[in-house]
Each structure stands twice: as structure tokens, then as C-alpha cells.
Image (cartoon, coloured by chain):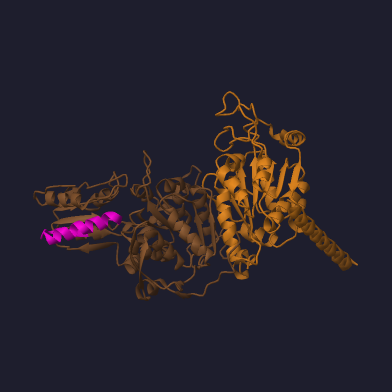
Chain colours: A orange, B brown
Amino acid sequence: MSLKYITPAERFKKYLPKDYVELVDYGPFGKTQEEAGPGNMGQFKELVEEHPMCSGCWMAYYIRLIFASLPNPEDTVTLGTAGCGRLAISQAAVPFIYGNYGDQNAMASGLTRAFRLRFPDKTKDVITIAGDGGTMDIGFSMTMHSWIRGEKFTTIMLDNEVYGNTGGQSSGMSPQGAVLKMAPKGKDFGKMPATELARAAGCVYTVRMSPTNIKKAAKIIRRAIFVAREVGPTFIHAYTSCNIEYSIPTHEVFADAKAQEKDRFTFEEYMTDEAKEVIERVEAEEKAARMARKAQKTEAVN
Amino acid sequence: MSPNPEKKLEKTLVDINYLLKEAPREKHFITGAQAMAEAVKRASVDMAIAYPITPQSEVMHLVGDIYAQGHIKEYYRAEEELGTMSAIAGAARAGVRLFTATSGPGLLRGLEAIVSWPGHRVPAVLGILTRVINAPLSIQPDNIEMAYMMHCGAVMLHAENQQDTFDFTLAAFAIAEKVDVYIPVAVATEGFFVTHAKGYVDMTPEDMALTEFDPVAAPVPAMDNETPPARIQRDAPVQKSNFMSYLIHAVWQQEIWDSNKRAMKYIYEYLGGPIEVKNPESEVFLIASGCAAAQAREAWRYAQEAGLSVGLIKVRAIRPFPIDEIRDTVKNAKSIIVPEHNIIGWLCKEVKAAIPNGGIVTEGPRVYGGMTLPVELIMKEIHNSLGLEYDLKL
């Protein structure tokens, strides 16, 4: 009944908030990516529309993109932790579980396993979306162990290289030398090798990227989710600048993301053979379905 | 990792009233750890998450064994206690019946997650097999960690012996899942003294188990995208500096503590009440919980033999605390003695706060660091209270 749980009875519709009814009528639930995906953002009722993020927040853009890319939003649960990211994630029309500091991957472990117990024949996508502090510092042990245990869900790290929400302290993912609060003389060690750690811990699909290309970023998010369903833990390390703490003028946020893409966030994609098989199969199926729909449309026009 | 579908055991599912009160019982001579695990075996638990710490480990080893036997559907050893308790909170959102246990320092390590369980409406059962937490470190069954658990909203039961451990643990699942409660229930008992020592336990049959968890019968639906109304948590924590969010937090916490209070009627229904009273007309009362209640019971027996006017109140429920019941029982008492297995005397403080004339409460006797509580120490306090001489020979 997954989709029905949000569908109101027709006679109650007029009493429900307009926002909710629009989400049911014009949102992405039960729709394909061509109908309601990143390619036509702004033309459908998106899962996350309101958020209290700073003007020019690249993280907010990426979060919007994550929700627009979900292969199965009606059966997705997200988990997060303290930080800027959760301010937007918790505004999305997808269940969001907010636990304690940095424990998103431990919660997701329990949730994923329990879902598989209760719904052995259904796909329930579980995604943790947390910042660099939550994922690599305070939640490090829980992140690593969820990967080591082979938990089947996707971890997305919103790396803004700083503790944005607590006021700009250095994190394990801040670059070496960065002068930040609690690193008053400059951070004295380099960025933690997140994707390397993920691979060593058993992630079967990892990506490091600066998500400047919407189509590509969406493809990666979907790949990570498809692989996690069947094979094992997947990890996306995305650069989502903090334009406030790093003083990036709003109109230069995109240029900065582009620049990082050529430098510290060059695109890096890793997958195991098993993960590759899943990706090739799913993408071939999607392509076939797309072609079939196109053919059907053409036929209908003719 | 995968569920255990090959191990589907045939069981008769019965409700908690039948299981606790009517089901046939057979006497076994087992440890407290076994008693807790045997209760878990009969509770149709879906998932148990384990992390080792002495003296709790024995319980979760046995729970692992009963998982392997097919009594539980999912079990794993987590990375540490915070990960364990967080995973319980995550799994609870999927709508399954959950169990874990911990001890002393482990409880404190997991406390950040545990104290958020009531507010998140996590109806899990937590075994607390008590242990020293303060330096210098020791593995002995001091029960000071219970003091830290008392203020999070969870229901807390304190078992005196192996039999209590079995019955309380079974009842805990039913209490936690009541629609008007739906908060975690902790079952505490002393490590080693109960967990590793054997006692007689009247147990229900192994092929009889509690009716299965019903995630739909909940005041908050599971976040499984299945159960209307949609449970989409918007702006989860209250972190905005405005009056409305303070109010939301305040109201929610009130509801949690009201849920805690509402558990009392089920403590009456399943455990016969939050206290057990002997000789209600006495001048002097012993009030104790857990293992200290066993020692107090022994002192009470000595006192009966000596013809002294001594009564006994064993406290089964620490939360909700039986304020009215205790106040009513001791209304004519001249003196109250509270033997405890910890240095701060948390039960003593609770008792003092519960009665109008707290001055009649004797602080102690207390043993800590996990030492045993000699009955003679309690006898000395009884004699002091009655104005009698007592030659204390330990």
C-alpha cells in the first residue's frame, strides 16, 4: 500500500492543506524520472521546496537534487543528524528520522534490517544524509561499522568542509591549513580519505564528486541506491560548499563548485563487479522502459 | 545478516495475561541471565542487538543462541553501546519488537540514545544488569547507573531474583507496547548476584509465546511508508528559538511522563502492583529494591523471629515510582530503613521525597563497589530504630 498511505480519500481532499494535495497530485510519487526527475525540476511539485538554508547554499541545491533523483520516493526513508543539512532534509516530504549526534548509520542499520524482516518482498530504500562532521567525525565509528557489516543502504556525505551549523569549527574533512574556529592556527592535518576508507570498509560503490552536473549527479544518486538494495553499502562523498564560513560570494558558489571539481573533488567512481552488474542491468531496463514509453507516445500521436 | 527464515518454530501464541497468570509452569534451576533470555525466547522478539559488557554479556550470548535456534528473527553484535541503542531506535521506526541489554559503563555510553527513546516512542525492552561505573573501575554489581536512567521517561522495573527477572522481562514487552504507554521499559537486576547465580524459576512452556508485535496498534505509526497517516517528521528536533517550539517540547515531555504514569495500571495487572508489603502495621519499615530487597527480606525474617515490629516494602517499579502506595503503607511508621547497593542512595532519596515526613528515613545501610550487603548491617539499623542494643559482628 506504499503509495496509498499518502493518498487522501477524494472527499477529504478539500479539507487538506493545499500543499499536501498538490504533492499528491503533482509530486513525484509513482512517477518516472522523465515525468518528475532532476531534468524538469521546477515543473513538478518537489519533495523539498521550503528550507531555511542560507542564500547560495550549495548543500541545499544538492539536497533538492537528491530528493528529485530518488528512484522510489514513496518507499524511501532518510536518516540524518545535527547540522545544516537536516534543516532542509527534515522539510522534505519523505520520512526523515533524526537521531542523536552522528548515529545516522547505526540507526539505518537497525531500520534496514527491520524493514527486510517486515517486508521481505518489497524494496524500502534507506539513505543516510549527513554532513562531514556527522559522518566522519562524531559518527565515524558508526559509519565505518555499518560499512564493515555490509549494511545495505546508501550513505551520502554532504561535505562542506566545516561545522556550519555550530558556527564554523574545523572538521576532519576541512582542508589542511584552513583557519577555522577551533583550528585558530590552521588545521594541522589533511582531509580524511573518506572514499578510500569507504572502500577499505567494504562499500561496493563509492563516488567522490562536486555535483555541478545535474544529470550526472542524479545518475550517481540512483546508482548508489540501486546497488545498495542488492549488493551492499554505497557511499557518495559530495562537495557542498559552505559559502558562509568560507566566504564564497553567493554569485560565485557555482564557480567554486566547478573549480573544486577540477582540483580536490575530481570525479572518482568505484564499483565492484557485482555492483557493476546491477548498474548495467538496471540502466538497461530503464532505457528499455524509456524507449517503450517513447514508442507508445509516438504511436499515440500518429 | 539475513533473516532466519529456515528456522521457523511452531509456537502457540497467547496474550500476556494468559502467559503470566494462567500458563502452566515448570520449575527450573537457572541463572538470572538464563531467566532473562528465556523470557526473551517467549516474547516473540523480532530483533535483538548485542554489545558485550560484563556482566551483561551472558544475557546477550544466550539471546544469540536462541536467535540461532530460530526464536528471534534478527540478531547482530553492534559496534558499541551508542551504536546499539541507536540501531534499536532505528529498528523501532520500522515497527518490530526489540530487545537489548547492557551494564554500568555500557549504559552510560548508550545513554544519549537511550534517553531519546521515550520521546521517540520506542517501545523496546532494555535489560540492565547492574555494574560499577565510577573509578576505580570494577565489574561488580553496584547499581548506581540506575540513578542515571531514572529521569529519561522510561519505565523501570527492578528485579529481586531470577524469578522476577523472568516475569518482569516478559511483562515489560506488554507494558512497553500498550497504546497508552508506548515508551521503553527497562528491567534491571544486579549483575553476578542475579545474572550469574542460580535460583528457582517457574517458567512457562518453551513452545508458548507472546502474541506478535503489532506495529499498527501504536500511538505513533511506524515510519514504514505503509501505515496511514503518513508519518513524515518535519523539523524533528525543537531547535528554533521561539515560544511555539519550546511549547511543543514541553507538551511532548509532559505526554512522555504521563505515559510513564499510565504504565502503573499494567504493573498492577501483570505484576500485582509496584510494591510488595509484609506486616503493614509495623513501626519500622524496610524499603528496598533488587538484591537489597532479598537481603532486607532476610533481615525482616530475623526480625519476625525476634518478635520485632518490622515491616517490609519491596519496590518493584522504580518508574513510575509508587509514591501513593509507599506513602499509604508507611503512614503510621516511626522509622524507615532503606538498604541499597550504591553510594548515593537513590532509592532513599525517592522514598524521602515520596513521604511527607522524610526525617524518619534512615540513610542506609549502603554497600557499594559491588560488595554484598550483610543482613547484620540491616539488623543493626532495625535495632537502632527501635532503641535497642545490637552487637554488630561482621
Q: Is residue B23 visible?
A: yes
Q: In the rendered view of the protein, which quadrant contains the N terminus of chain B?
A: bottom right
Q: Nearer the viewer, residue B58 or A212?
A: B58
The picture places residue B137, in percent across and down from the top left corner, at 38, 41
> Residue pushed farthest top?
A185
The picture places residue B23, in percent across and down from the top left corner, at 38, 75
Residue at horizontal 57 percent and vertical 27 percent from the top: A183
Q: Nearer the viewer, residue A24 or A146?
A: A146
> Residue pushed farthest left?
B388
The picture places residue B254, in percent across and down from the top left corner, at 39, 54
Q: Main secondary structure of the magenta part?
A: helix
The picture places residue B170, in percent across and down from the top left corner, at 40, 65
Residue at horizontal 55 percent and vertical 56 percent from the top: A110
Q: Is residue B96 visible?
A: no
Figure label count: 0
Query: Does residue A269 show up magenta in the picture?
Result: no
Which image quarter: residue B33?
A: bottom left
The residue segment tinted magenta is B289-312
Q: Nearer the viewer, residue A146 or B30?
A: B30
Q: Is residue A263 above or below residue A302?
A: above
Q: Is residue A288 above or below residue A68?
A: below
